[in-house]
């Protein structure tokens, strides 16, 4: 009978979970959730063949299986190792794992520039979170970091190769989502870089998804470039009828301006599934061209983890004081002592940042004065 | 009723005697204190002419710093604004054009940077949050004014003088900052 499929019992950090055969340790740990799940920089559950490159998901296998309870000699990459029945895995309870992970983070950061103040990914960057949670303070690397010229991949995507950690997620995305992949990893070793062949632009309806899968700020949305920091924008869930994609997106608003459109992310930072069970990839039209609030049906504010910087300053359950002034003054409105827009240069109502195709420059600010 | 502490004293309802009733003795006691202050060191100073030294941890008006080459250090990362408990700081970022490389240190810069001094509580968290050494709290006061609009400080009000074009003014502004840093260390 198909329902009596044998489930494997795995113990991860002293928590036992039953999973189907063929599940990786990482996915079993994600089933438990919380801190037990190892971090992953290259593995993306929605992309076939991803994983096994960044080594941040290393775990210790204390007992291989019930049949062969010997521990595995080395730490294993949990995204590429399948569970066995009776396997005992140690993640955050193992000193070895924490130490190895700190080492991996140090390696990932060797060539990663410290330009988080400039980077648009800051605030939702997986590498930032990873180094904050698992890394060591400071660096021991004295040599020159690898630098590249920044590229523009097509009209919408900005590539900062300097920030890339070579996770290959974008290559898999382009491979599996689009028919013709024109970008890939060129060269080997320290010279390896994401590039398009002969600077070919990527004109495909779904190529914008490489921005969402990129764990760092290497691939960023050019229409959002330098417009605002993510934690000052208000994320809302929205949808529209799109003939190409599911149309379920997240809008990042400043007032009524749609500064950025992304796919909705789940708790692991991966693109959410639609109710039909498909991955909610969104098309370029939804992502880059629908920058008006009227294009969208707003469902409501997105749920943001309370500990995320994006939740900063988003007040929940605010009780505004009852305005009694006009009642006491027989319907007279309070006299406004200062309209901030007459004094302030910031957020001028006549400058619509969302209408700009690229980053604002001094020309934008000077010409509108 | 039981008292909360053992320091409570019952009020004396005893009628005053003759010496107490004429108050002369108490007045003399008070005058002695007042006259004694004539011979003491004055606690006040003539403010605009004389100035009291600031405490090394004094947090005054903000300045936006420049680097040695006179380029603005601020890259509009927004950390000061998110750290600000009074939500006094707002900014708008812009990309540096190739012709502006002598003006701004990084590829992104603050095209607009404003501090609402009416909201600011001078806590110094912006200075602490800044990853680029761009904002400092100097040892000057925000001058008083009658209108609210003069308390919205923009970039022209906040930027430190350029060391290339106005070296004396820069040294003056910088000297205050350095003193503070020195006494901090």
Image (tube, rainbow, N blue to C red):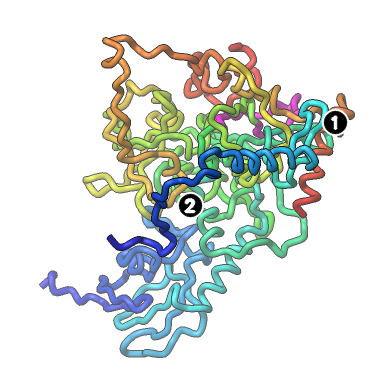
Task: Locate the C terminus of chain A by quadrant.
Answer: top right
State whether residue A330 is above or below residue A60: above
Q: Which residues are magenta?
A: B89-109
Looking at the rendered image, the quarter that the N terminus of chain A falls into is bottom left
* Front residue (pair A91, A51): A91
Query: Would you say the residues marked 2 and 1 are in contact, meaning their CB atoms lie under 8 Å apart?
Result: no
Q: Which residue is mark 1?
A: B163
Q: Is B51 part of what is drawn in magenta?
A: no
- The image position of residue A215, as x and y in percent, is 50, 51
Task: Give coordinates of residue B82: x percent, y percent.
Answer: 52, 40
Disc 2: which residue = A169
Residue A149 seen in the current view:
no
Q: Are marks 2 and 1 on the same chain?
A: no
Q: Residue furthest left?
A: A1
Image: B28 above or below A133:
above
Q: Nearer the viewer, residue A32 or A55?
A: A32
């Amino acid at each position: 009978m198909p329902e009596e499929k044998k489930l494997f019992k795995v113990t991860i950090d002293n928590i036992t979970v039953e999973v189907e055969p063929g599940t990786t340790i990482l996915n079993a740990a994600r089933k438990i959730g919380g801190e037990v799940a190892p971090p992953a920089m290259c593995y993306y559950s929605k992309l076939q063949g991803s994983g096994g490159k960044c080594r941040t998901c290393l775990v210790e296998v204390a007992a291989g299986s019930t049949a062969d309870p010997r521990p595995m000699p080395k730490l294993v990459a949990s995204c590429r190792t399948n569970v066995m029945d009776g396997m005992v895995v140690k993640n955050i309870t193992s000193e070895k794992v924490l130490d190895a992970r700190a080492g991996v983070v140090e390696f990932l950061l060797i060539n990663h520039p410290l330009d988080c103040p400039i980077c648009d990914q800051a605030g939702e960057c997986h590498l930032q979170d990873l180094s904050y949670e698992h890394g060591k303070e400071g660096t021991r690397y004295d040599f020159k970091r690898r630098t590249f010229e920044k590229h523009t991949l097509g009209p919408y995507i900005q590539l900062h190769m300097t920030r890339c950690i070579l996770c290959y997620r974008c290559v898999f995305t382009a491979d599996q989502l689009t028919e013709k992949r024109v970008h890939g990893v060129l060269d080997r070793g320290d010279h390896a870089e994401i590039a398009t062949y002969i600077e070919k632009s990527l004109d495909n309806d779904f190529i914008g998804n490489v921005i969402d899968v990129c764990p760092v700020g290497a691939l960023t949305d050019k229409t959002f470039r330098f417009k605002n920091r993510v934690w000052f924008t208000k994320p809302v869930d929205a949808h529209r009828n799109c003939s190409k994609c599911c149309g379920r997106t997240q809008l990042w608003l400043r007032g009524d301006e749609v500064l950025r459109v992304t796919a909705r992310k789940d708790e692991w930072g991966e693109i959410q599934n639609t109710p039909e069970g498909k991955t909610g990839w969104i098309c370029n039209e939804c992502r880059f061209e629908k920058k008006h609030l009227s294009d969208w049906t707003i469902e409501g504010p997105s749920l943001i983890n309370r500990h995320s910087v994006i939740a900063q300053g988003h007040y929940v359950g605010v009780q505004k004081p009852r305005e009694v002034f006009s009642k006491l003054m027989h319907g007279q409105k309070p006299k406004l002592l200062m309209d901030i827009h007459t004094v302030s240069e910031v957020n001028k109502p006549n400058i619509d940042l969302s209408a700009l195709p690229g980053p604002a420059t001094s020309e934008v600010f000077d010409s509108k004065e | 009723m039981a008292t909360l502490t053992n320091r409570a004293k019952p009020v004396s309802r005893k009628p005053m005697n003759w010496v107490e009733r004429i108050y002369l003795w108490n007045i003399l006691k008070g005058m002695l204190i007042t006259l004694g202050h004539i011979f003491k060191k004055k606690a006040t100073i003539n403010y605009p002419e004389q100035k009291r030294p600031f405490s090394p941890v004094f947090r005054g008006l903000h300045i936006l710093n420049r680097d040695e080459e006179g380029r603005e250090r601020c890259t509009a990362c927004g950390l000061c604004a998110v750290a600000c408990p009074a939500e006094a700081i707002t900014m708008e970022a812009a990309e540096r054009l190739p012709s502006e490389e002598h003006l701004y240190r990084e590829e992104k810069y603050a095209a607009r940077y404003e501090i609402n001094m009416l909201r600011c509580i001078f806590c110094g968290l912006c200075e602490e949050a800044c990853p680029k050494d761009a904002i400092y709290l100097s040892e000057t006061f925000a001058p008083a004014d009658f209108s609210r609009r003069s308390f919205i400080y923009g970039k022209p009000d906040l930027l430190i003088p350029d060391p290339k074009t106005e070296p004396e003014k820069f040294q003056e502004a910088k000297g205050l900052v350095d003193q503070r840093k020195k006494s901090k260390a």
